Structures are given as structure tokens and as C-alpha cells.
């Protein structure tokens, strides 16, 4: 069985190669090298995570099941709500929150 690179992987590598061909100046070169390095680390981390998931599922002979997210605590929910309200107020909106009652 041969290795086949998916379309999205080809696009990532093509865009990375294209970026390298369009750099200008030493300052730009340094910035792009640092950015490419960070992007490479991120891609490698994702590839490693996928490889582990695939290996564990193949080794155990099981299907992949999406992890179930943990429910948020009331404290976390309040913090998120307050941050969203503050963000909207900072943008110039007046925010009024009302309890949501689903239609029956």
C-alpha cells in the first residue's frame, strides 16, 4: 500500500513553498523563518497527535470515538458570559441579558 498525500496536505506544503519564494529583505527573512518554524512545530504536533490516535485505535482494534467535553462549571460559565458582555460593551453595544426559555 503506497502513501498518498491528501489534498489539504498538498495545499499546506504548496503554500509554504510559495511563501518561501516571495520573501524580501533580511528583516522579512528572519520573521518568515521564525513563523515557518512555529508553523512547522504546530503541524508536527498535530501529526503526532493523529498518529497516536490512529496507532491506539489500530492496536486495540476499536473505532475512534470523539471525546465527550466536560461540562463547564457555573464559575466558568459566568466568567465567559461576563467577558462576552464586556467585549460587546467595548465595541459600543448596550447589552441586556434575559433568561432563555426554549419553545415547547
Image (tube, grey):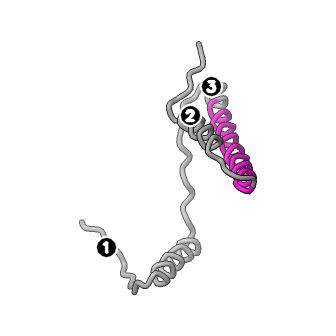
- Is residue 42 highlighted in magenta? yes
Which callout, 1 or 3, points at the residue further toward the start of the chain? 3
Which element is circle 3 on?
helix
Residue lying at 50% horizontally and 78% vertically, measured from the top left: 87
Label 1 to label 3, Cα distance in Å? 45 Å
Give x and y (percent) for residue 17.
Answer: 62, 37
Residue that badge 2 annotates? 9
Q: Main secondary structure of the magenta part?
A: helix
In which quadrant will I find the C terminus? bottom left
- Whether residue 98 sits left or right of residue 84 in the image: it is left
Give x and y (percent) for residue 26.
Answer: 75, 53
Which element is circle 1 on?
loop
Compared with 3, 92 (above or below) is: below
**Of the pair 30 and 47, the residue shown nearer to us:** 30
Give x and y (percent) for residue 34.
Answer: 74, 51
**Of the pair 101 and 90, the residue shown nearer to us:** 90
Residue at the farthest front position: 25
- Whether residue 14 sits left or right of residue 96 in the image: it is right
Residue lying at 30% horizontally and 68% vertically, measured from the top left: 102
Give x and y (percent) for residue 7.
Answer: 50, 31
Compared with 61, 50 (above or below) is: below
Residue that badge 3 annotates? 58
- Is residue 16 highlighted in magenta? no
In which quadrant will I find the N terminus? top right
Numbered badge on residue 101: 1
Residue at the farthest top position: 1
Which element is circle 2 on?
helix
Residue lying at 66% horizontally and 40% vertically, measured from the top left: 49
Residue at the farthest left position: 104
Numbered badge on residue 37: none
Residues rendered magenta in the picture: 27-54
Amino acid at each position: 500500500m503506497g502513501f498518498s498525500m491528501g489534498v489539504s496536505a498538498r495545499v499546506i506544503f504548496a503554500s509554504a513553498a510559495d511563501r518561501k519564494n516571495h520573501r524580501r529583505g533580511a528583516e522579512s527573512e528572519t520573521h518568515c523563518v521564525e513563523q515557518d518554524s512555529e508553523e512547522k512545530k504546530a503541524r508536527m504536533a498535530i501529526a503526532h497527535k493523529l498518529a497516536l490516535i490512529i496507532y491506539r485505535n489500530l492496536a486495540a482494534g476499536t473505532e475512534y470515538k470523539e471525546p465527550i467535553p466536560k461540562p463547564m462549571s457555573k464559575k466558568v460559565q459566568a466568567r465567559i458570559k461576563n467577558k462576552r458582555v464586556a467585549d460587546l460593551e467595548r465595541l459600543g453595544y448596550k447589552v441586556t441579558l434575559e433568561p432563555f426559555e426554549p419553545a415547547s
